Structures are given as structure tokens and as C-alpha cells.
Image (spheres, helix red, strand yellow):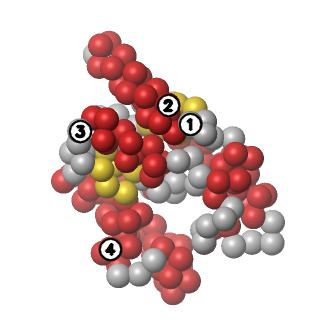
Amino acid sequence: MGSGKTTVGQQLARALKVAWIDSDGEIERRAGRTIPQIFTADGESAFRDLEEQVVADLLAEHTGVLSLGGGAVLSTRTRERLVGHSVIYLKVSAEQGFSRASNSDRPLLRAEDPAAVYRDLLAERDPIYHTVATIVVDAHPHQRRVADDIIAALSTQEATQ
């Protein structure tokens, strides 16, 4: 949350001249409801099941840039499906990420101490992100530069394969 994956993903797709899609947006489109509505009505477990299916479909069908929700890689099956793909981890500090995400309607941040929840989520997920990522990029505030950093890393990755 708050790493800039939507903005950076769009900029990266534009620079690479490929299509971009956001898995959270596709989940909302298919469900006909927002993610907060899904969480409230059905719970996180039902959301994660839907997310896993949507990501599987998108990985099978989409050939451009795909922005995944921060919890998508909690699924073992999703992590397995990501093998063989370039996976970018937009690394953000807990303070910076929370600052960016705190003014949104994020279901997981609906808590008495949302900053603590964010820190805990990032601490729990960071090792998973590092395991699945083929490239780790600092998600600094200059998002156009982040996209440029990714392009440079992808070029280096391709040159070494």
C-alpha cells in the first residue's frame, strides 16, 4: 500500500508501449463492488479467493504491465504463478508508505492505530516480496524516475539472461 504501484505501473506501461492493468481494478470490475465493499460484506478471506482467481486469469491473458495488490503474493498459488515473470517490488519505508496510503479507504487500515497496522503488514510481507521479486526498486516520491529505474533494471536483467 502506498508504494505507487498504480502510477508507476501506468508510467512503465506507457514507456514500454504496452497495456497496463491493475488487479484491484479488475477485481472491482468483476465483483461490481469496491474492495472496501467486498471486505465489509464478504470478509478478507473471500476477497483473497477472488483476488487469487483474478490474478491467475490476468497472468494467463495479459501481456503488458500488471499492478498487483499488496496482499496478492500472500497466496502460495499466486507466488507459483509469478515464477518466470519479471516481478518488481516497489520498496517503500513504513513511514513513507503509510503517509501515502493513510488518506485512502483501505480496509486493512481501519483500525485504532492504522500506522501500527501498516508497519506490521509491511514487516510480515517484506520477506515474501523479496522472495518473489526479480527486481527491487526504491519507491521514492519521483515516480517517473522509479519507472526509469525499473526500465534500466529490466534491461540489465535481459542482458544477463
- The span from disc 4 to disc 1 (Cα, nearest Å) is 29 Å
Q: Quadrant of the C terminus?
A: top left
Q: Position of residue 15 (x, y in %)?
A: 31, 35
The secondary structure type at the circle numbered 2 is helix
Q: CA distance from mark 4 to mark 2?
A: 30 Å
Earlier-in-chain disc, 3 versus 2: 3
* C-alpha span from label 1 to label 2: 5 Å
Residue type of the residue flagged with mark 1: His
Q: Amino acid at mark 2?
A: Arg
The number of numbered discs placed on residues in the rendered structure image is: 4
Can you tell which quarter of the image residue 134 is in? top left
As drawn, 14 above or below 156: below
Q: Position of residue 151 (x, y in %)?
A: 37, 27
Residue position for label 3: 17
Residue 76 in sight in this render: no
| Disc 1 target residue | 142
Residue drawn at point x = 52 percent, y = 54 percent: 70
**Residue 21 drawn above or below residue 157:** below
Asked whether residue 68 appears in the rendered view, the answer is yes
| Mark 3 residue type | Lys
Circle on res. 145: 2
Image quadrant for the N terminus? bottom right
- Image marks 4 and 2: residues in contact by CB distance under 8 Å: no
Side (left or right) of 110 relative to 32: right
